[in-house]
Image: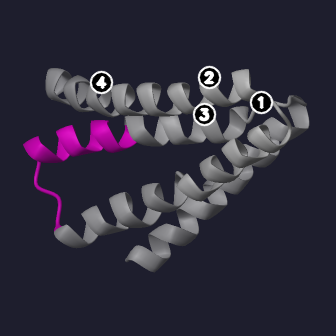
Amino acid sequence: MVSAGGSIGAVLRYIIFSLFEKSHASMFPWPTLIINVTGALAIGFLWGWFDRFYVSPGIRMLIFIGILGSFTTFSTFAFDVFSMVHDGQFRNMIIYILGTNVLGIGMAFGGYYLAKLIS
């Protein structure tokens, strides 16, 4: 289940990254930020939804560890930060670190409470 989900998440990330890169040339790593923040929202929302409705442990592993674990990526985030430091883009680096962490955690909480609100 984890392996199948990992394949799905990696392909989704690649597709979104490729589409965004073709349409937006930027020094800021927008694709990774968007992927990580939307992944955090999805994790929070689904966690809240699954609190209300039974979902088997296997399906939870498929979604949380496989799909969303592979879709979001800390290694790309770390590489982006390293690249910005290397290129002297300290302002963008700080915005990126704060944006990823504050928005990501906020979206996870927001998604969880949104699922509770509508379910």
Residue holding disc 2: 95
Amino acid, disc 1? Phe
For the residue carrying disc 2, how many other residues have a C-alpha within 10 Å: few (<14), some (14-19), or many (20+)?
few
Question: Along the polypeptide, which appears first: circle 3 or circle 2?
Answer: 3
Q: Residues within 10 Å of mark 3 (few under 14, many from 20)?
A: some
Residue bearing mark 3:
34
Callout 4: 10 Å neighbours few (<14), some, many (20+)?
A: some
Residue 84 to residue 59: above or below: above
The label shown at residue 37 is none
Q: Position of residue 75 (x, y in %)?
A: 60, 58
Secondary structure at badge 2 equals helix
Residue 12 visible in the current orientation = yes
Q: Main secondary structure of the magenta part?
A: helix
Amino acid type of the residue that numbered disc 4 sits on in the rendered structure: Gly
Position of residue 19 relative to residue 88, above or below, is below
Q: Earlier in the sequence, mark 2 or mark 1?
A: 1
Residue sitting nearer the eye, 78 or 104: 78
Along the viewing direction, whichever of 79 and 2 lies nearer the viewer: 79
At x 15%, y 28%, the residue is 116
Residue type of the residue flagged with mark 2: Ile
- Quadrant assignment, res 32: top right
Task: Identify residue for label 1.
Answer: 28
Q: Residue at x 22, y 45 (%)?
A: 47
Instruction: Give how far across and how far down residue 39 sits, in percent.
Output: 46, 42
Q: Mark 1 or mark 4, which is nearer to you?
A: 1
- The magenta stretch is 42-56
For disc 4, the marked residue is: 110
- Tell whether label 2 touches label 3 (CB within 8 Å): no
Of mark 3 and mark 1, the one earlier in the sequence is 1
Query: Residues under labels 1 and 4: Cα distance?
Result: 25 Å
